[in-house]
Image: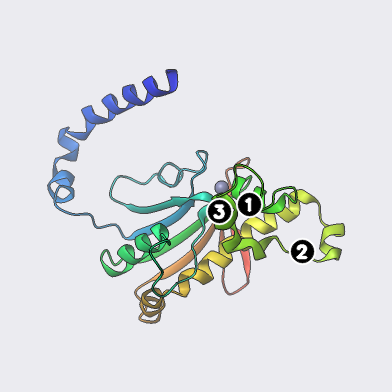
Amino acid sequence: MAAYDQLISGYREFRANYLGDDNKEWLKVAGKRQDPKVMMVACSDSRVHPAILTRSALGELFMIRNVANVVPPFEEGGDDSTYHGTSAAVEYAINHLHVEHIIIMGHSGCGGIGSLMDNSITDETQGYSFIRPWMKIVEEAASFTDLEKVSMSKASRTCVCEKRAILISLNNLASFPWVKKAIQKGELQMHGWYFDIKSGNLSEYNMKVGEFEEIT
Ligand SMILES: [Zn+2]
């Protein structure tokens, strides 16, 4: 229960400040609507918390968190058996909140990506009935040539896979018609981020160079 009790005690501390004088002006606006300028797609991983990592406050980040920070491609229609939680959030962020930036943030040691890199995990593996089909969206990221398999360590390939998956999700994001339109109109920018848990380094994908570069 210690973990749960810690949450309650944290909440009590938060609430005491929340209704304090410093927050009064903000509450006047926030009580009516939200107006974030940034949407972030991050992994559910507990070690990669976007607001903590960027020192963001309430109201600043419109968040999607899912396994391995994946954005599926745009799908027209979709039957009743298909659920589009991530796509719905993208739609809301663009068409209603008019965010100016969308950031997809991947990270090192990602369990979702690890499942792609682990050949022992198949469609029949117990405990992966939802993870497996979800990760298929970015499975191309785990495709390596025989030469790459010999010349690169498993750790290096996993890191490459994590970064490639971010690029696939960025491409998928750009397949949504209203995302495409907002980019063309200069109203929206997309960014790919990669967070290394051990070093704490954050890299940003440079679209012109085609590489992730460390933010210093
Ligand atoms: Zn992850």
Q: Disc 2 marks which amino acid?
A: Phe
Other residues around mark 2 within 10 Å, as few (<14) / some (14–19) / many (≥20)? some
Number of residue marks: 3
In the rendered view, would you say 174 is above or below 151? below
Which is nearer the eye, 172 or 194?
172
Residue 163 sits in which quadrant? bottom right
Which is nearer the eye, 70 or 136?
136
> Helix, strand, or loop for circle 2?
loop
* Image marks 3 and 1: residues in contact by CB distance under 8 Å: yes
Nearest to viewer (mark 3 / mark 1)? 1
Residue carrying label 1: 113
* Image marks 2 and 3: residues in contact by CB distance under 8 Å: no
Q: Ligand 1 near label 3 (Cβ, under 8 Å)?
A: yes
Residue 33 sits in which quadrant? bottom left
Residue 161 sits in which quadrant? bottom right
Residue carrying label 2: 144
The residue at 37%/80% (across/down) is 181
Q: Ligand 1 near label 1 (Cβ, under 8 Å)?
A: yes
Q: CA distance from mark 2 to mark 1?
A: 14 Å
Q: Disc 3 marks which amino acid?
A: Gly
The residue at 40%/81% (across/down) is 184
Residue 2 is situated, as x and y percent measured from the top left of the image, at 43, 18
Q: CA distance from mark 3 to mark 1?
A: 10 Å
Which is nearer the eye, 43 or 125?
125
Q: Is residue 14 visible?
A: yes
Other residues around mark 3 within 10 Å, as few (<14) / some (14–19) / many (≥20)? many
Residue carrying label 3: 106
